[in-house]
Image: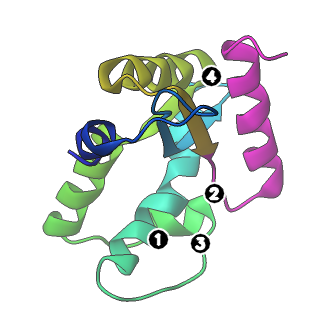
Amino acid sequence: EALELYRSTYRPSPRHPKPHTALCVWALAADTETEAQHQFMSRARFRLLRDRGIFAALDAPDVAAAYAYTDAEKAFIEGYRRAAFVGSGVQVASRITELSRQLDVQEMVVVTWAYDAAVQARSYELLAEAMGFR
């Protein structure tokens, strides 16, 4: 809806004759889908707490995964997991590319939060590789 509003109200200029859309997504890639899903638990727990107004630091994935979640919390995390851009580099790159096509977005920005900085850096490496930037 926001993209359509932007496009429909865009005023061209000599320097920018057409609208240029950009979208930022949170994504996490790892060497395997299993590892990505494990690392995702830090983000899932953070999001669960944030949606309750609790702004806490990311927990280690083992700590986040070991928490005694209620059935409602498990359902929230599972829904969030299905919508999240998480998996191998190829899987995540494919989902980002598809979203870009669906929304006709010219620029995609990826933000990765991970408990471990090395996991974050590896995610960016895998995505760059899968997208053909390396």
Q: Residue furthest bottom?
A: 54
Three-letter code, disc 1: Phe
* Disc 2 packing (10 Å; few <14; some 14–19; many ≥20): some
10 or 37, nearer to the observer: 10
Residue 45: x and y in percent read 43, 68
Q: Are marks 2 and 1 in contact (CB under 8 Å)?
A: yes
CA gap, disc 3 and disc 1: 8 Å
Three-letter code, disc 4: Gly
Figure check: 22 above or below 61: above
Secondary structure of the residue carrying tag 3 is loop
For marks 2 and 3, the one nearer the N-term is: 3
Q: Are marks 3 and 1 in contact (CB under 8 Å)?
A: yes
Name the residue rendered at 48%, 56% in the picture.
41
For marks 4 and 1, the one nearer the N-term is: 1
CA gap, disc 4 and disc 1: 23 Å
* Disc 1 packing (10 Å; few <14; some 14–19; many ≥20): some
Name the residue rendered at 48%, 18% in the picture.
97
The residues colored magenta run 111-134
For disc 3, the marked residue is 59
Three-letter code, disc 2: Trp
Secondary structure of the residue carrying tag 2 is loop
For disc 1, the marked residue is 46
| Colouring rule applied to residues | rainbow
For disc 2, the marked residue is 113
48 or 24, nearer to the observer: 24
For marks 2 and 1, the one nearer the N-term is: 1
Name the residue rendered at 41%, 88% in the picture.
54
Which label belongs to residue 89? 4
Figure check: 38 above or below 14: below
Tally of numbered tags: 4
* Disc 3 packing (10 Å; few <14; some 14–19; many ≥20): some
Is residue 10 on the magenta stretch?
A: no
